[in-house]
Image (spheres, rainbow, N blue to C red):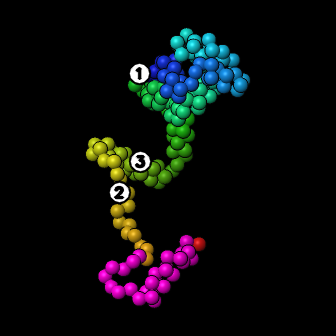
């Protein structure tokens, strides 16, 4: 269920340390009809800003995840799923795939879902994505006496960019 937009706007404005006059001036400069009394009306829940004005305020207040901030969790009030535009696009692409393509997507989706479930249950904060990789770089040797020739060889390896071109 969506949260009260006005309460969130007021809280966000206060956290951004902005006055009603400041946000009113910014919105007015950007072409919105937003007097101070209009801002107060939005914050008190008597009316709501246009989508454009809301986006400007969110930008000024430093709100990056607008949907989450205003209580959108991807579900309708009856509990059914409400897809966003990106999710709709993915479903449409999925429907164009042949059986093999759908099988591949299903395998990846199921494995990632399992991984995220395990991650959430273990409360792990660090993920070792590729434990089989080893560092392969020239470094100071500690188990032998290093000659000038050995050092020159190590330096040549460290300065050789040909592998990356």
- Disc 1 and disc 3 in contact, CB within 8 angstroms: no
Mark with earlier residue (2, 3): 3
The crowd level at tag 1 (other Cα within 10 Å; few <14, some 14-19, many 20+) is few
Front disc: 2 or 3: 2
Q: Residue at x 37, y 50 (%)?
A: 111
In the rendered structure, find residue 43 and report the number of the disc placed on it. none
Q: Quadrant of residue 120?
A: top left
The magenta stretch spans residue 49: no
Mark with earlier residue (2, 1): 1
- Disc 2 and disc 1 in contact, CB within 8 angstroms: no
Q: How many numbered marks have been drawn onto this rendered protein structure?
A: 3
In the rendered structure, find residue 78 and report the number of the disc placed on it. 1
Q: Residue at x 41, y 21 (%)?
A: 78
Residue identifier under label 3: 109
Q: Mark yes or no: residue 98 visible.
A: yes
The crowd level at tag 2 (other Cα within 10 Å; few <14, some 14-19, many 20+) is few
Q: CA distance from mark 2 to mark 1?
A: 39 Å
Q: Is residue 82 above or below residue 157?
A: above
Q: Residue 66 in the image: state x and y as whole percent.
A: 52, 31
Q: Residue 21 in the image: state x and y as whole percent.
A: 62, 19
- Residue range highlighted in magenta: 139-164
> 151 or 110, which is in the foreground?
151
Residue identifier under label 2: 128
Q: Is residue 117 above or below residue 26?
A: below
Q: Is residue 47 left or right of residue 143?
A: right
Q: Residue 86 in the image: state x and y as whole percent.
A: 54, 38
Q: Secondary structure at mark 2?
A: loop
The magenta stretch spans residue 148: yes
Q: Mark yes or no: residue 88 visible.
A: no
């Amino acid at each position: 269920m969506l949260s009260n937009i006005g309460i969130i706007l007021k809280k966000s404005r206060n956290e951004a340390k902005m006055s009603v006059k400041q946000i009113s001036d910014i919105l007015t400069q950007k072409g919105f009809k937003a007097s101070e009394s209009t801002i107060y009306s939005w914050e008190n829940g008597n009316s709501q800003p246009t989508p454009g004005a809301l986006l400007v305020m969110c930008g000024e207040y430093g709100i990056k995840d607008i949907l989450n901030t205003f209580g959108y969790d991807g579900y309708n009030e009856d509990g059914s799923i409400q897809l966003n535009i990106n999710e709709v696009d993915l479903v449409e692409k999925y429907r164009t795939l042949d059986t093999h393509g759908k099988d591949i997507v299903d395998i990846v989706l199921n494995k990632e879902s399992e991984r995220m479930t395990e991650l959430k249950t273990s409360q792990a904060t660090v993920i070792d994505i590729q434990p089989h990789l080893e560092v392969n770089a020239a470094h100071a040797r500690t188990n032998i006496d290093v000659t000038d020739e050995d050092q020159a060889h190590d330096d040549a390896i460290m300065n050789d960019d040909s592998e990356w071109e």
